[in-house]
Amino acid sequence: LKPLSASGTAGLRPAMADTASLLEKYKVAETEEPSSSAAFHQKVLSVTPEWEKYEATKGNARLLQMLEANVPAMKTKTVLHGNLGILTACMDATQMEEDKPIQWILTTLYDMLREDSSCYSVFE
């Protein structure tokens, strides 16, 4: 294998900078206690967004309502495999302005992947 040249990585720098800024934005402060992170997680998932109330998700509300938080990863994986439009609707919804629905989607998908790494196949 050949190592990447310096010029071969130049296109990656903006993407890496964007990723770093997102990680910094959502990073739990080192002074915060882990329980506050768990509390935030619980708070995010405590209320399922009402997708039909958001202009950006009105058209996909029925698809997004099929996604559930706090269920076994295998159930979420089966639902997503059964209707790949749900995943597309999730990705489209991450472009909206409101933070709470985006946090709900990302947390739900993150929990699924953490519980069962075979769920990565949904994204292939």
Image (tube, grey):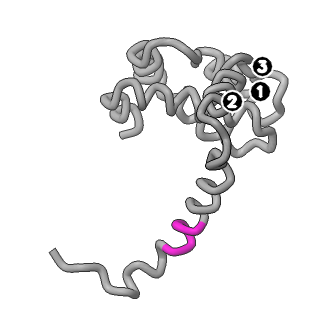
Residue type beneath disc 2: Phe
State the CA–CA distance, disc 3 to disc 1: 9 Å
Please tell me which residue is depicted at 61% across the width and 27% down the height of the picture.
38
Label 3 – label 2 distance at C-alpha: 19 Å
Does 44 sit left or right of 86 as displayed?
Answer: right
Residue 93 picture location, percent across and down: 68, 37
- Compared with 27, 20 (above or below) is below
Q: Write down the residue under mark 1.
A: 58
Span colored in magenta: 13-17
C-beta proximity under 8 Å, tags 1 and 2: no
For disc 3, the marked residue is 50
At x 67% / y 25%, what residue is drawn? 39
Q: Is residue 95 above or below residue 109?
A: below
The numbered dot on residue 40 is: 2
Which quarter of the picture shows residue 116?
top left
Label 3 residue SS: loop
Spot occupied by residue 87 in the image (x, y as percentages of width and height): 53, 32
First in sequence, mark 3 or 1: give its number: 3
> Considering only order in the chain, which callout, 2 or 1, is on the residue closer to the N terminus?
2
Overall secondary structure of the magenta stretch? helix
Report the amino acid beneath label 1.
Answer: Lys
Q: Quadrant of residue 90?
A: top right
Could you tell me if the residues under marks 3 and 2 are in contact, i.e. CB atoms within 8 Å? no
Above or below, 6 against 83 in this view is below
The magenta stretch spans residue 45:
no
From what the image shows, is residue 23 above or below residue 100? below
Question: Which of labels 3 and 2 is toward the front?
Answer: 2
